[in-house]
Amino acid sequence: MTMNTPTDLRPLFDAQHRASRAQIDVPLALRRERLLRVRALLDAHGSALAAAVQADFGVRSPQLTEIADLFVLRTLLSHTLKHLPGWMKAQKVSTPIYLLPSHAYLQRQPLGVVGVISPWNYPVQLALAPAITALAAGNRVMLKPSELTPRTAALLAELIAQNFAPDEFCLVQGDGALAAAFTALPFDHLVFTGSTATGRKVAEAAAANLTPTTLELGGKSPCIVDASCDLAGAALKIAHGKLLNAGQTCIAPDYVLVPEGSETAFGEAYALAVAQLFPTIAGNPDYAAIISVRHHERLQALLAQAEGAGARLQVLNPGGNSADSARQMAPVLVFDTTPAMKLMEEEVFGPILPVLTYTSLDAAIQYINDRPRPLALYWFGSDNAARDAVLARTVSGGVTVNDTLMHIAHENLPFGGVGDSGWGAYHGEAGFLRFTQQKPVLVSSKWARGDLFYPPYGKRFDQIMGLLKRWL
């Protein structure tokens, strides 16, 4: 496995920078051809990539990687290839009367070199999705994947090197020191997906170069269960969203708010849902392992601290066998939490779901609004007035109503955070525009009368300004 050093980065960046400046106008045919190379890579090596992900996690089924990584990328590629010609076209804009008969438009151009720092939880999707969108926008891409999935990173490095010149698209491998050097490069745009704490460091490093960033962070995404909902159906969808990849998903429900008095009923419905999805935990390939011993120990420490402070734990292990030895951590519901518990201060990022109660919808909304704005919000119920109140009075990166996670699968919806959960969005045309300079162009007509506004000012100027004021 070839690991890069910080000194390797600058020559790679400089090569991409030179290439991006030498070919500013990147034609549609070349952009499409690059995307088709990525598609061919996935088609030919999807099974090998799924096997690498499984090896990195210890337990994670190829089917999970197929749906959560590869299928998402295939739909992204299909959507992008279909719409790319329209996205690339110059966009006409209307011209105000005082500039007529001139005309104006927005010319869409590549930014140049885009850096991507991707996480370990969906190591193929979250590495290649922003890269695909940046390539579609005509950029060069440097990718730094997580060191916690080394087999996946090594295979991606090999496949990218086989299909792309280094000055088009390259992957570098290394630890935190390499990541720090990577963020210090003067990219034209930098994409980071990961924790809020690390995102702050990335933003600080990028600011030194005035590098614009897209930060896809996380946070504590709430799930509101309204009294009007079908509890059994809601519990199944919440369990699926929470336990996909064993909760190691940035938009997983982090905690659930249920009407006071319904916590027992919710716990029973959630337990049935877990048993339906995962009849066993230990040895079940569909139930992913926690990525590392360190992350597993962190989750156990969160539970121990909460229980020690008075929380009640409901461990859900339908098969009954101990799974912790393989880092397959059984799902846990946590009741009677307090704000001081670390579990309620940090993003969980695991199969632990705190269950909170609320006495009124206003109280639930207030609880959410008193905390940093989340990456995602979920609401379950049939009361449209309550739903609309939640949508109108809360701010989050995205929302799915009566399900979890699914807004991320809609290619016409931008995906991104707000506030502490990040900034900037990609997916679909929103992502294309994120990695594009929309250059405003005004083409002045020979009949344009800009000279009417030239000095020396006098009576004619005052008459013209008076006329314009009446039109405005």
Image: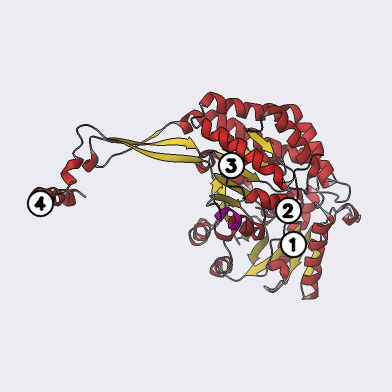
Mark 2 or 1, which is nearer the eye?
Answer: 2
Question: What SS does tag 1 mark?
Answer: helix
Q: Is residue 303 magenta?
A: no
Where is mark 3, residue-wise? Answer: 114
Q: CA gap, disc 4 to disc 2? A: 66 Å
Amino acid found under the numbered disc labelled 4: Gly
Question: What SS does tag 4 mark?
Answer: loop
Amino acid found under the numbered disc labelled 1: Gly
Question: What SS does tag 3 mark?
Answer: strand
| Sequence-wise first label, 2 or 1 | 2
Residue drawn at x 26%, y 42% is: 96
Checking the image for residue 203, the label placed there is none
Residues tagged 4 and 2 counted as in contact (Cβ below 8 A):
no
Start-end of magenta stretch: 204-209
| Sequence-wise first label, 3 or 4 | 3
Q: Is residue 205 magenta?
A: yes
Checking the image for residue 176, the label placed there is 2
6 above or below 102? Answer: below
Q: Closer to the camera, 250 or 195?
A: 195
In the image: residue 284, left or right of residue 40: right
Checking the image for residue 267, the label placed there is 1
